Amino acid sequence: MRKLALQDGRYAPEAFQFLYESLDTAIQLAGRTDLQGKERHVTGQELVLGLRAHAREVFGPLAAPVWRSWGVHETMDWGRIVFLLVDAGLLNRQESDTIEDFREGFDFDAWFVREYRPSLPEDWKTPGGGQP
């Protein structure tokens, strides 16, 4: 995967790894965790939702700058990475999958920064022992 990323040169190897890590989140959000084989397949838009959710969990409001540092500036970039992996035989696709599945994206800054709301554990307490 790293070799493929370096050969292509548009995206950091970390973006390829992050995409793989996000597949589980996408499968879970699509409700296909208990399925096997081709039935676990997610669409481009379902993968985008998984990428977004995983990024928010891992990077919080820093997700947009992290993605940009990897060369990912729009959701179509994720589609380009997916199809690089498909062409290299590292991901499978269905006949109906196209790069256009990634066109309907979202504004990274709006989702990761302006819409970000931290989630604190319910048992979190302020230093004085009181509730927040």
Image (spheres, rainbow, N blue to C red):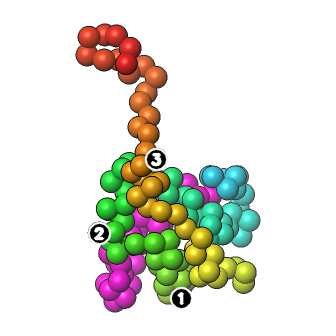
Lower sequence index among marks 3 and 2: 2
Residue 40, above or below 28: below
Q: Where is residue 101 drawn, in percent x and y?
A: 63, 75
In magenta segment, residue 20: yes
In the picture, the disc for residue 87 is 1
**Mark closer to the chain start, 2 or 1:** 2
> Which residue is located at x 45 percent, y 72 percent?
74
Quadrant where the N terminus lies? bottom left
Q: Secondary structure at mark 2?
A: helix
**Alpha carbon separation for disc pair 3 and 1:** 35 Å
The residue wearing badge 3 is 115
The amino acid type of the residue labelled 3 equals Glu
Mark 3 is surrounded, within 10 Å at the Cα level, by few (under 14), some (14 to 19) or many (20 or more) other residues, namely few
What's drawn in magenta, residue-wise? 1-27
Residue 55 visible to the viewer: no
Looking at the picture, which amino acid does disc 2 mark?
Ser
